[in-house]
Image (spheres, rainbow, N blue to C red):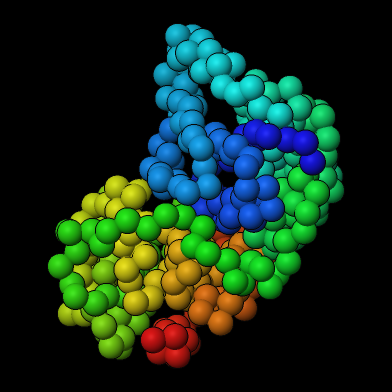
């Protein structure tokens, strides 16, 4: 392996970035002198900053471009990407046409998933080399396999279990006044991934530590207010920045939530978690003795996700409570 500098492209979403960052420590352990840059959408830069294994984190304004449809923003983006590097290799960890285009603009030698395993098969047209890693593979193993296949080394399940925290941890947010707390992730990107507020209230009431209800938008804040109105043990969190969110999870006794980025932060930071699955499966996490999945009885086809599947709501609160008490 003769690469001295690489760029990793993982533009979005938050959970996918969190579940991709684990690869960095394995690259650095194998090639300690390699330069690694990360290219992502601008709003996600704070979740990665600072990172001991990254030399630079480049945020690009894709969201702004989509919103404004501005030629000026497009030209600025193209100039920004062409000014990066030069890199010996660019790895597209996302497998979408947009990420493949960004990767190709950032470097000439690009590696990614092949047409049968990329999320969008046409993305493979932009790659100089490809890996065949089936889409239904566990997401953490899939990310690690892509990078290890590209750079010529192996990452075992045992090494992943023994990983260092995948993200840096800052200070405990000053806005959290509870001395000890359990983080409850109220929302998710799809409504069907959200555990019903009324049932979350039952869980909070039975837990031995105060529950901090973490929300990210107005709808999630309303759900948090519903939970707090039904449980004296539930406390609504302040509005967090991404860095504060990361640190709030790092200092929690336990995190409970659906299949969403804030919940997956616990695994990334080597903190205990209970992850609830309805329309998706534990493929989306790496289970460990302290990171537990609870599934609904829904039969999920991971290649054809039913976003209307609200079966997460059928998970009994007592099942969640039992796992939570075991971890506590």
Instruction: Determine whether 218 is above or below 74 in the image.
Output: below
Does residue 219 appear in this view? no
Farthest-out residue, front? 33
| Residue 251 vs residue 183, the one in the foreground | 251
Residue at horizontal 65 percent and vertical 33 percent from the top: 5
Left or right: 132, with 181 as reference point: right
- Specify the quadrant of the image occupied by residue 299: bottom right
Residue at horizontal 39 percent and vertical 86 percent from the top: 328
| Residue 30 vs residue 267, the one in the foreground | 30
Instruction: Determine whether 48 is above or below 134 in the image.
Output: above
Question: Where the N terminus falls, by quadrant?
Answer: top right
Residue 66 locus on image (x, y percent): 48, 24
- Specify the quadrant of the image occupied by residue 280: bottom right
- Specify the quadrant of the image occupied by residue 285: bottom right
Residue at horizontal 24 percent and vertical 77 percent from the top: 180
Residue 292 locus on image (x, y percent): 54, 78
Residue 142 locus on image (x, y percent): 72, 56
Does residue 269 appear in this view? yes
Residue at horizontal 56 percent and vertical 82 percent from the top: 289
């Amino acid at each position: 392996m003769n690469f001295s500098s690489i760029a990793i492209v993982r533009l979005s979403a938050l959970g996918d970035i969190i579940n991709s960052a684990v690869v960095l420590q394995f690259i650095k352990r194998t090639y300690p002198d390699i330069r690694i840059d990360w290219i992502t959408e601008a709003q996600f830069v704070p979740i990665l900053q600072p990172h001991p294994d990254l030399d630079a984190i480049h945020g690009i304004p894709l969201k702004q471009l989509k919103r404004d449809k501005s030629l000026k923003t497009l030209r600025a983006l193209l100039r920004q990407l062409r000014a990066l590097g030069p890199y010996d290799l660019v790895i597209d960890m996302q497998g979408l046409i947009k990420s493949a285009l960004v990767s190709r603009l950032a470097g000439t030698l690009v590696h990614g998933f092949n047409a049968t395993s990329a999320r969008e098969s046409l993305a493979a047209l932009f790659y100089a080399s490809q890996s065949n890693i089936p889409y239904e593979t566990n997401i953490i193993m899939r990310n690690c396999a892509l990078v290890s296949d590209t750079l010529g080394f192996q990452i075992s399940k045992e090494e992943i279990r023994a990983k260092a925290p995948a993200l840096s941890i800052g200070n405990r947010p000053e806005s959290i006044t509870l001395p000890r707390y359990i983080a409850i992730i109220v929302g998710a990107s799809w409504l069907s991934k959200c555990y019903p507020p009324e049932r979350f209230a039952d869980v909070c009431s039975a837990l031995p530590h105060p529950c901090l209800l973490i929300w990210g938008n107005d709808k999630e804040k309303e759900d948090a207010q519903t939970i707090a109105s039904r449980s004296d043990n539930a406390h609504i969190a302040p509005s967090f920045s991404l860095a504060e969110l990361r640190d709030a999870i790092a200092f929690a006794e336990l995190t409970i939530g659906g299949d969403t980025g804030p919940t997956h932060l616990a695994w990334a930071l080597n903190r205990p978690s209970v992850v609830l699955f309805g329309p998706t499966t534990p493929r989306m996490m790496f289970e460990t003795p302290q990171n537990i999945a609870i599934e609904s009885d829904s039969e999920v086809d991971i290649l054809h996700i039913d976003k209307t599947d609200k079966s997460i709501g059928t998970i009994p609160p007592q099942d969640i409570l039992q796992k939570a008490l075991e971890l506590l």
